[in-house]
C-alpha cells in the first residue's frame, strides 16, 4: 500500500510543521497543493452550473434500491416507524440536538459534526420505508417525504450553508434522497414533476461532490468513499444528463481501488477505529448492492470485481465479530453510517441484511468464537463463557497520520456476562471542545499504562488541524502472543509489555515498563460501582461482581467521563494504580453473577 498522507501546513504550529516534514510521516505536500488548486477551480466551475434547472428529459430510474428483507421488517419495523415519527416531529434523540425540522434555521450546537448528521437526511429513508410498513398511511408518509425534499431544495440552495459545507454529507444526502424516493415510488407514489426536480437536485449534489471530492493530496478515507457512493447513486438514477454515465463509471472504479487501499487483509478498515470500520463497511455494502442492481438494468456498466467482494466479505465478518463483543469504541467514533433506518444511533442490522444480497456467505449471526485476531488492525478478541475481552496493539492508521487513532496501545476492554466493566472512553466531541477531544484520545483515558505523564504518541499543539494528527508512531505496538487464553503486547513506549492470561473465571495480568514508577489505568463503565480496599477493589455492575487485586501500588479514584455514543457524555469512574517500581501483577476474578457466588 502506498504511504502518502496529507497535511494542512497553514494551521500547524511551527514545531509541528518541522516534525511532520522531517519525521517518519511524510506529507504529500505537492498533492495537497494540487488538490487545493483543483478544488478551487472545479468548485468555481460547479458553482456557475448550480442550481440545475429541472427538465422533462431528465428523469429518474426506479426499482434500484432494495427493500429490507421481510424478516428484517418484522423485527425492526416498529423502530423504523418510531424514528420516522420522531423525525416528523423534529425530535432526534441523539447527538444532543435540539428540536429541528427541515426548513428551520440550522441548530446551534457546540460541535458542527452534530449538524452534519442532520444534513445527511437519513430519516428520509425511514419516511419511505414507513410507507411500506404503515400501509394505511402510505400516502401520508410519501407526501411528507416529498414535501421535505422540496422544502430542502428551496430553503438550502446548493453550495450555501452548513448543509453543503462537507462533501461527505452532501454525497450521503444524495444517496438518502434517491434511495428514499425510489422506495416511495415502489410504494405506489408517483409525480413526474417532482421526479424532474429531484433529478436536478441530484445533479447539483453530484456536481459539487465531484468538484470538492476529498482526496486531500492522496489521503483518501471514509470521506472519499462516501463521496463516491453519492456520485454513484446520481449516476445510476438520473437519466437524460450528459454527466451521469461518466459519474457512475468513475465512482465504481474509484471504490474498486479504495477497497484495496483502505481495507487490509484481515478485512478491517485502515483508520484505526472500529466506528470508522463500521461506517466504511456500510458504504461499501450499499455500493455493492447498488452496483448489483444497476448492472441488471444496464449490463454494459462496470461491475465490482470478485476481489472487491471477497475483501468486503472479510470486512462484514470482522464487523460482525466486533459487534459480538459489544462494539468496543477503539479510536474515534462519530456514529456515522451510510444508512440509518431506526434512528441516528448506529444500527448494523440493515447493513448485514443488505450484505446478504451480494455476499453468498453473509449471515445475520456468526458462529460463536473463542479468539479472533485482526492482525493488520491490531485487535484481539478473547471470549469464554465469562469474559469478552479485547486487546488493542497495532498501527496508528491512515498511513501513519493517525487522524482517528487514540493513544490506546496495549489497552483492553472487558465485558462480563454481557455487562460492561472496562471501557474505551469513546469520542465526546471533535471540534466543539478541543481540550475534551484531546482528553478522549489521551493515554490517560485508556486501559493501559502511563509513564511520567508522557503520551504514547505526541500530537500537534494547535487546536485546529492538529486535532486529527499524531506526529509520530512512537509507541510502535506489536502483538507477541495471541491465542484463546493468552495475549502479550509489546510497545516502544518505555518498553511497556502487557501479559494477559485467562484461566476460567479469572484474568491475570503482568505490566512491566522501563521506568521506576508508572500508572495502570482502569476506566470503568458508568454503571460500575467501585469499592476500594487495601490492594483490592470490588466492581459491581447490576449484580455481576468482580474483584480486582494487585501486588504493588497505591490507588486514586477519579470521576471521569466516557462517551458510549458520540456527543453523549456520561460520568464514570477511573481507578488509577500508582506503581512504585517497574512491574505490577494484577488480576480480575468473578465473585458473583446476579447475587450468585461463583466458586
Image: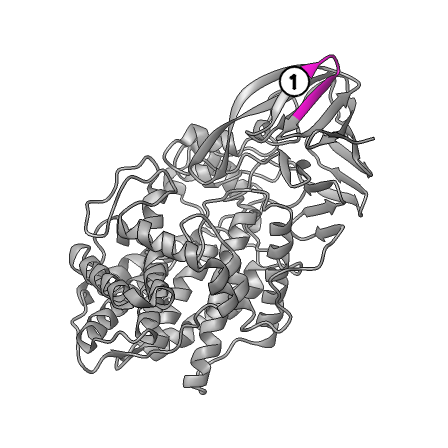
> Which segment did they paint magenta?
531-539
Q: In this view, does 195 lie to the left or right of 441?
A: left
Q: For residue 492, what is the image quadrant?
A: top right
Residue depicted at 53% across the width and 38% down the height:
471
Q: Is residue 47 visible?
A: yes
| Residue 33 position in % (x across, y down) | 38, 53
Which of the pair 137/565 is nearer the observer?
A: 137
| Residue 353 position in % (x across, y down) | 53, 65
| Residue 399 position in % (x across, y down) | 56, 51
Which of the pair 386/594 is nearer the observer?
A: 594
What secondary structure is marked by label 1? strand
- Give the vertical position of 47 relative to 537 (above or below): below
Q: Is residue 383 left or right of residue 18?
A: right
Which of the pair 10/59 is nearer the observer?
A: 59
Q: Quadrant of the N terminus?
A: bottom right
Residue tagged 1: 531
Circle 1 crowding by C-alpha within 10 Å: few under 14, some 14–19, many from 20: few
Amino acid at each position: 500500500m502506498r504511504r502518502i498522507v496529507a497535511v494542512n501546513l497553514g494551521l500547524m504550529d511551527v514545531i509541528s510543521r518541522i516534525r511532520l516534514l522531517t519525521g517518519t510521516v511524510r506529507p504529500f505536500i505537492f498533492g495537497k497543493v494540487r488538490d487545493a488548486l483543483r478544488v478551487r477551480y472545479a468548485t468555481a466551475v460547479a458553482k456557475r452550473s448550480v442550481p440545475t434547472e429541472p427538465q422533462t428529459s431528465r428523469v429518474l430510474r426506479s426499482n434500484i434500491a432494495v427493500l429490507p428483507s421481510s424478516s428484517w421488517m418484522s423485527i425492526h419495523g416498529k423502530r423504523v416507524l418510531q424514528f420516522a415519527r420522531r423525525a416528523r416531529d423534529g425530535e432526534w434523540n441523539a447527538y444532543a440536538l435540539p428540536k429541528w425540522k427541515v426548513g428551520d434555521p440550522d441548530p446551534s450546537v457546540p460541535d458542527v459534526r452534530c449538524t452534519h448528521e442532520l444534513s445527511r437526511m437519513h430519516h428520509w429513508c425511514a419516511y419511505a420505508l414507513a410507507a411500506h410498513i404503515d400501509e394505511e398511511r402510505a400516502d401520508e408518509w410519501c407526501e411528507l417525504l416529498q414535501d421535505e425534499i422540496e422544502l430542502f431544495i428551496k430553503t438550502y440552495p446548493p453550495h450555501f450553508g452548513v448543509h453543503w459545507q462537507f462533501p461527505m454529507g452532501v454525497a450521503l444526502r444524495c444517496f438518502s434522497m434517491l434511495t428514499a424516493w425510489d422506495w416511495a415510488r415502489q410504494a405506489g407514489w408517483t409525480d413526474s414533476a417532482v421526479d424532474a426536480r429531484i433529478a436536478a437536485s441530484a445533479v447539483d449534489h453530484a456536481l459539487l461532490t465531484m468538484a470538492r471530492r476529498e482526496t486531500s493530496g492522496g489521503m483518501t478515507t471514509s470521506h472519499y468513499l462516501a463521496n463516491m457512493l453519492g456520485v454513484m447513486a446520481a449516476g445510476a438514477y438520473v437519466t437524460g444528463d450528459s454527466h451521469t454515465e461518466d459519474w457512475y463509471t468513475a465512482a465504481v472504479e474509484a471504490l474498486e481501488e479504495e477497497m484495496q487501499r483502505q481495507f487490509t487483509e484481515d478485512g478491517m478498515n485502515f483508520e484505526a477505529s472500529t466506528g470508522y470500520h463500521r461506517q466504511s463497511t456500510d458504504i461499501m455494502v450499499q455500493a455493492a448492492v447498488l452496483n448489483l442492481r444497476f448492472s441488471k438494468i444496464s449490463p454494459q456498466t462496470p461491475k465490482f470485481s470478485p476481489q472487491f467482494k471477497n475483501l468486503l466479505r472479510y470486512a462484514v465478518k470482522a464487523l460482525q465479530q466486533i459487534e459480538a463483543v459489544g462494539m468496543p469504541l477503539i479510536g474515534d467514533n462519530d456514529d456515522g453510517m451510510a444508512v440509518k433506518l431506526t434512528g441516528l444511533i448506529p444500527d448494523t442490522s440493515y447493513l448485514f441484511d443488505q450484505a446478504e444480497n451480494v455476499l453468498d456467505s453473509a449471515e445475520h449471526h456468526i458462529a460463536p468464537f473463542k479468539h479472533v485476531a485482526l492482525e493488520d488492525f491490531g485487535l484481539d478478541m478473547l471470549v469464554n463463557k465469562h469474559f469478552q475481552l479485547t486487546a488493542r496493539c497495532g498501527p496508528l492508521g491512515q498511513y501513519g497520520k493517525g487522524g482517528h487513532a487514540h493513544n490506546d496501545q496495549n489497552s483492553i476492554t472487558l465485558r462480563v456476562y454481557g455487562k460492561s466493566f472496562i471501557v474505551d472512553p469513546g469520542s465526546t466531541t471533535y471540534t466543539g471542545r478541543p481540550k475534551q477531544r484531546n482528553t478522549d484520545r489521551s493515554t490517560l483515558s485508556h486501559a493501559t499504562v502511563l509513564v511520567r505523564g508522557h503520551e504514547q504518541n505526541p500530537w500537534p499543539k494547535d487546536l485546529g488541524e492538529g486535532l486529527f494528527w499524531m506526529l509520530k508512531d512512537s509507541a510502535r505496538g506489536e502483538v507477541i502472543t495471541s491465542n484463546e487464553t493468552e495475549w502479550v503486547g509489546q510497545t516502544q513506549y518505555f518498553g511497556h509489555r502487557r501479559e494477559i492470561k485467562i484461566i476460567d473465571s479469572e484474568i491475570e495480568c503482568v505490566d512491566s515498563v522501563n521506568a521506576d514508577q508508572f500508572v495502570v489505568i482502569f476506566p470503568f463503565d458508568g454503571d460500575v460501582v467501585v469499592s476500594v480496599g487495601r490492594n483490592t477493589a470490588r466492581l459491581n455492575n447490576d449484580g455481576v461482581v468482580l474483584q480486582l487485586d494487585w501486588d504493588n501500588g497505591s490507588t486514586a479514584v477519579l470521576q471521569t467521563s466516557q462517551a458510549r455514543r458520540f456527543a453523549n457524555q456520561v460520568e464514570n469512574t477511573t481507578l488509577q494504580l500508582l506503581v512504585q517500581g517497574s512491574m505490577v501483577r494484577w488480576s480480575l476474578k468473578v465473585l458473583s453473577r446476579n447475587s450468585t457466588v461463583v466458586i
